[in-house]
Image (tube, grey):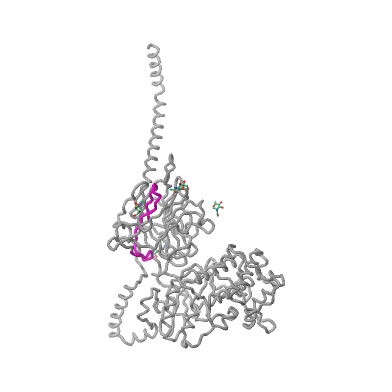
Amino acid sequence: MAAHHDVWQITIELLKKKIPILLQMDRKLSLLLVVCLLTGISATKYDEFTYNGFQRSELYLDGVAEITPNGLLILTNTTRNQQGHAFHKVPLHFKNTSEGNIYSFSTCFVFAILPEHPDVSGHGLAFVLSPTRGLPGAMPNQYLGLFNSANNGNSSNHVLAVELDTISNPEFGDIDSNHVGIDVNGLRSTDAAPASYFVEKIDKFKKLSLISGEPMQVWVDYSNPEKKLNVTISPISVPKPSHPLLSSFVNLSSVILETMYIGFSSSTGSILTSHYVLGWSFKMNGQAAALNLSSLPSLPLKKHRRNLSSLIIWLSLGVVVFITITACSIAYIIRRKARYAEVLEEWELENRTHRFSYKELFKATKGFPEKNLLGVGGFGRVYKGELPTSKTEIAVKRISHDSKQGMREFVGEIASNSQLRHRNLVQLLGYSRRKGEVLLVYEFMTNGSLDKFLYDANNPTTLGWSQRLKIIRGVASGLLYLHEEWEQIVVHRDIKASNVLLDSEMNGKLGDFGLSTLYDHGSDPQITRVVGTFGYIAPELTKTGRATTSTDVFAFGVFVLEVVCGRRPIVQQDSQDLHLVDWVWKSWRNGVILEVTDARLGGDYHLGEVEMILKIGLLCSHPVPAARPTMRQVMQFLNGDLSLPQMPKGGRGITISSPEHAEELEES
Ligand SMILES: *[C@@H]1O[C@H](CO)[C@@H](O)[C@H](O)[C@H]1NC(C)=O
Ligand SMILES: *[C@@H]1O[C@H](CO)[C@@H](O)[C@H](O)[C@H]1NC(C)=O
Ligand SMILES: *[C@@H]1O[C@H](CO)[C@@H](O)[C@H](O)[C@H]1NC(C)=O
Ligand SMILES: *[C@@H]1O[C@H](CO)[C@@H](O)[C@H](O)[C@H]1NC(C)=O
């Protein structure tokens, strides 16, 4: 015992001496403890958050994303080909470290998509779980700011997204241009449904338009035990519907990492659109808190919305105003009418296509002066303009059209064409009509038409091989969409270098599709004119006068050769027409195929690729229709999914100079 006592004594003595040091240590320890506790607390704090507006939010923004002083999160702000990201600043733990189970989670947000024009918009937005903050390397446009062409669909992405997609992209198997989809590691959705919400009263889903500009609420609930991902959407005035829009089995085990960032991603295309998020809540292992809808920030005023009912209201208002003004100053009206006179018939109200007023376009182009003339085509003159309110650059094509008959079909055609949406088609934004004239409004293409690059000696820019290949691919993909991927078959009828327009990134886009039908709706239905451009017309077309997808493929073949050779389809040589197709065939037979390539390429190209493209050009421009591939096959050749058929190297001469010749071939 005594020994024990001594030990205590010594210890106490020691303690007395060392107490200041110990005290100091204690302070450090407790500090450490406090820090530990705090971080612990903050870690749990971050597993749940609610933002009714983003004034005091902890978001990491990139791209064109910004937060306005009143707390509105703007992912994209009427910008072209841009992306915007907003991520919760700190990563969240999505897995139970000891057992490796994924946590269930739940989120809820309010968004709005406000396009510049009521019927068309950019690409949409997505709620996203990602291993990185800001998705480096992602592309805007159809990749929604999530992926790029190389990593799309790769399981090493570890990305889960719920997309609110406003463009139908056949490349990713989109179901329509207004849908909600679940994307795992790529943009080909594992599950998707047209945007709609369940209404208990009628026991049915009711459609809603994502690009209406109205705020809408989305709930994403994942339950890990069942591996069920539910997505529910509804207008902001409607509480959470009892049935989700999507309820999908998704096994996230190999997708979700220990920690993930959560946020939003959005991209615009060539059409001005703003994407907004107004509020957002999230909770790990529980139900996300409901948003306080009345305290969400307000959206900017809509500048340019015009739906059918408001159009009618405006029209009737217009009538009242018209009567009043007539009473006041008839002379003035007559003068104005002469200048801006328009024709609007009842059936036009059925079309969803945006109708511009003539006045609007007159102002946008500053009165169609010569200096704004972009070009003169077979269908009319094209002017550059800028819509005054939105500063959107546009190209306006004026087509004179005298026949009243056929106008209805033609406008119907325009309406259906304006629903066509593909990144390799020049987007039709709307139209305007007055007596004897139709005006078509297109998105403006910065780099003009391709022929200027191929043939204009004054153009300092020479297209490199990879640029030419990209343009050919683009046009092929646009044409495939017209032929096979749209609801009905659309025959372009006038494919040629001058109808391929280039955007700011030198992507090729087909223009003028369907316009040739204008001729079919001409004043005299007895006369069927052969449409198309000399040098691109398939032999059988001159006989039958019937344009088909196969005559399109022929013209595409000529176009392809044109791009590789840098030569027009027909050149005069020794007062004779020399057909490009014949010339390439000849070089092919003589085994000097590469001699035809454009000298401006300076031999800087991939031999195998050039040979493949030339072969595709020859196959497509084959005089016998049955020998031509379909555009789907062309796409497969281009992608290397289908090998090219054997070409007859020592074969007989094939010429398209006379249709009779083709007939011979057909019969032999
Ligand atoms: C966003 O849009 C508003 C309203 O049109 C404009 O005032 C603002 O400058 C835009 N911001 C950016 C970054 O473009
Ligand atoms: C997927 O990405 C990884 C890492 O970037 C890469 O090594 C792999 O080749 C990619 N897989 C495919 C099929 O592209
Ligand atoms: C998902 O929806 C189904 C069907 O309505 C429902 O039974 C299930 O509980 C929901 N799961 C979650 C996590 O909300
Ligand atoms: C989910 O995937 C993991 C691995 O990818 C697998 O081990 C597990 O069995 C899957 N679970 C279900 C329910 O399919």
Outermost residue on the front side: it is 668
Count of marks, rendered view: 0
Residue 209 is a magenta residue: yes
Vertical relation: 563 (above or below) 522:
above
Q: Position of residue 522 (x, y in %)?
A: 47, 85
Q: Quadrant of the C terminus?
A: bottom right
Outermost residue on the right side: it is 590
Residue 363, picture quadrant: bottom left
Vertical relation: 348 (above or below) 55:
below
Q: Position of residue 610 (x, y in %)?
A: 64, 66
Q: Position of residue 37 (x, y in %)?
A: 38, 37
588 relative position to 406: left or right: right
Vertical relation: 196 (above or below) 27:
below
592 relative position to 52: left or right: right
Residue 467 is a magenta residue: no
Question: Looking at this view, is 499 or 174 the one in front?
Answer: 174
Residues in magenta, as a range: 206-230
Q: Position of residue 125 (x, y in %)?
A: 42, 59
Q: Quadrant of the N terminus?
A: top left
Outermost residue on the top side: it is 2
Question: Looking at this view, is 38 or 182 the one in front?
Answer: 182
Question: Looking at this view, is 470 or 295 the one in front?
Answer: 470
112 relative position to 130: left or right: left
Q: Residue at x 69, y 76 (%)?
A: 652
Question: Looking at this view, is 459 or 572 the one in front?
Answer: 572
Q: Residue at x 44, y 42 (%)?
A: 100
